[in-house]
Image: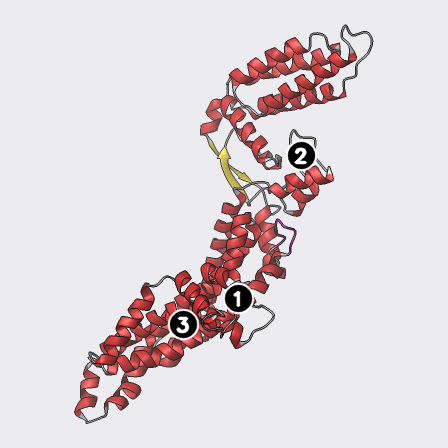
């Protein structure tokens, strides 16, 4: 068995590694966190780009590094595009690159655009100009607005129109500005004449080495159990593990409760198939199965946590008080769904095993119905129920979003719901990873329990 467990763990680690890669790459599609843009405005710690980005925030989330060890791009794409932090600016650069196909020309145009804007911002009025200081400042504001419009577009026609407007605005301004504008017009002419568009259709593999976002993230996770920081500047590990502890309490109790009720009920209804007990339990169980979980949770609160009816339990969970009053209603809401599935599965498994030849032999020997059920049928019938543990355990650990939200339980499901609304990807990634680990552990535990229930099973 030890050899089998080690083999399953190794396969599980490989599966988790693949899941981590997929999850990380999907999360990276969002680009630079909005938090880094907001902090730039508040802290005024910005780069010399058209859009403010907080460098400290960028470095904290490793957004200044490539996403993965390698990337497949077109021959036209540069290997430094990941250092453009603003998502909108990056999109504009990609559109310009699609128009021309030569990154050197696109980069030269972007740099000249930035240089022209910087020169305009630092220009000063002097008495030699043929316009007043007020007119100069007004022209400077209007020109700055046109430059900002140019930075927001990749359209050749729109840019040409804006540059023509700038030519007219620059007429009464200092000669130094004219020089930069001439260079900008020259760079734009080169950009508007596509000569290397064929490069866009030639794939190229770019190797970035180990100094990338994923490598830092997975290394920190494996060596320290650290998922990094959330976009709300919280330690992801602390937030997620606190929620996991709450979900584990409920899930373990819920699974124990479900199995302790489902197995005896399944055995009893199978032994008395077709009788009134079997029929009534079947109707009740299928009725329960048909009721949505959010409706059950709401009804439980309205009936049993209502001062006007039965004020027996608390309507919401208190994470500081794990008492029966606070945990009873959430546990019922957690358990009833899996309870229905497990009890009916146990019944069907018992009935199937009762049709085997060895049961007919036991009946022929005159053994009682109870002795046959518990000594000969029970162990074999238990195997499918134990297999269901592999699916029940991770789903409960992952938490029920609806139930945890209704009862105010600070578990994994509620955390996932709240962080999905806020777009906090580091926490969402951590929850997906932990759920994957629990799923693999669930299958392993189910296999071990099956082996213990029936030693004849060969784990291979």
Q: Which residue is mark 2?
A: 52
Mark 1 lies on a secondary structure that is loop
Above or below, comparing residue 365 to residue 426 in the picture: below
Is residue 161 placed above or below 444 in the rendered structure? above
Determine crowd level at label 1: few under 14, some 14-19, many 20+ residues with C-alpha closer than 10 A.
some
Residue 424 shows up from this direction: yes
The quarter of the picture where residue 165 lies is: top right
Q: Is residue 450 above or below residue 53?
A: below
Which quadrant of the structure image shows residue 57?
top right
- Judge the density around disc 2: few (<14), some (14-19), many (≥20) Cα neighbours within 10 Å: some
Whether 114 is among the magenta residues is no
Q: At which x and y percent is residue 371?
A: 27, 90
Name the quarter where the C terminus is drawn: bottom left
Residue 229 is inside the magenta segment = yes
Question: Which contiguous range is marked in magenta?
Answer: 228-234
Q: Which residue is mark 3?
A: 446
In percent of width and height, residue 419 lies at 54, 52
Badge 3 local density, few (<14 within 10 Å), some, or many (20+)? many
Name the residue tied to disc 1. 316
Query: Label 3, label 1: how many angstroms apart (C-alpha)?
Result: 33 Å
The mark that comes first in sequence, 1 or 2, is 2
């Amino acid at each position: 068995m030890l050899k089998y467990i080690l083999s399953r763990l190794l396969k599980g680690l490989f599966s988790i590694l693949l899941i981590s890669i997929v999850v990380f790459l999907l999360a990276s599609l969002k680009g630079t966190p909005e938090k880094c843009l907001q902090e730039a405005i508040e802290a005024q710690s910005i780069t010399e780009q058209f859009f403010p980005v907080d460098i400290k925030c960028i470095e904290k989330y490793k957004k200044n590094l490539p996403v993965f060890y390698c990337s497949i791009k077109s021959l036209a794409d540069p290997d430094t595009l990941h250092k453009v932090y603003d998502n909108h600016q990056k999109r504009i650069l990609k559109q310009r690159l699609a128009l021309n196909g030569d990154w050197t020309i696109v980069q030269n145009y972007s740099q000249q655009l930035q240089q022209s804007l910087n020169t305009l911002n630092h220009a000063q009025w002097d008495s030699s100009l043929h316009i007043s200081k007020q007119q100069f400042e007004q022209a400077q504001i209007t020109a700055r607005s046109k430059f900002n419009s140019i930075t927001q577009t990749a359209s050749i026609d729109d840019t040409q129109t804006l540059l023509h407007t700038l030519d007219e605005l620059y007429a009464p301004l200092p000669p130094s500005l004219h020089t930069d504008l001439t260079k900008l017009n020259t760079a734009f002419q080169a950009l508007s004449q596509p000569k290397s568009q064929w490069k866009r259709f030639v794939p190229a593999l770019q190797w970035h080495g180990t100094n990338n976002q994923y490598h830092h993230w997975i290394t920190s996770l494996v060596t320290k159990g650290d998922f990094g920081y959330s976009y709300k500047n919280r330690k992801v590990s602390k937030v997620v593990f606190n929620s996991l502890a709450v979900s584990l309490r409920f899930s373990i109790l819920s699974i124990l409760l479900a199995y302790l009720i489902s197995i005896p009920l399944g055995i009893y209804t199978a032994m008395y198939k077709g009788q009134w007990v079997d029929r009534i339990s079947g109707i009740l169980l299928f009725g329960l199965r048909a009721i949505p979980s959010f409706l059950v949770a709401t009804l439980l609160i309205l009936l049993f946590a209502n001062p006007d009816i039965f004020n027996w339990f608390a309507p919401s969970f208190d994470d500081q008080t794990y008492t029966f009053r606070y945990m009873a209603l959430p546990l019922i809401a957690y358990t009833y769904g899996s309870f229905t599935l497990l009890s009916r599965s146990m019944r069907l498994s018992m009935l199937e095993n009762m049709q085997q030849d060895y049961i007919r032999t036991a009946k022929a020997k005159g053994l009682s119905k109870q002795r046959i059920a518990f000594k000969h049928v029970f162990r074999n019938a238990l195997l499918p129920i134990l297999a269901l543990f592999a699916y029940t355990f991770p789903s409960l650990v992952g938490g029920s979003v609806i139930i945890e939200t209704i009862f105010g339980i600070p578990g994994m499901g509620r955390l996932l719901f709240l962080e999905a609304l806020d777009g906090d990807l580091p926490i969402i990634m951590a929850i997906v990873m932990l759920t994957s680990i629990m799923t693999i552990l669930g299958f392993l535990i189910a296999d071990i329990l099956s082996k213990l229930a029936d030693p004849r099973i060969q784990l291979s």
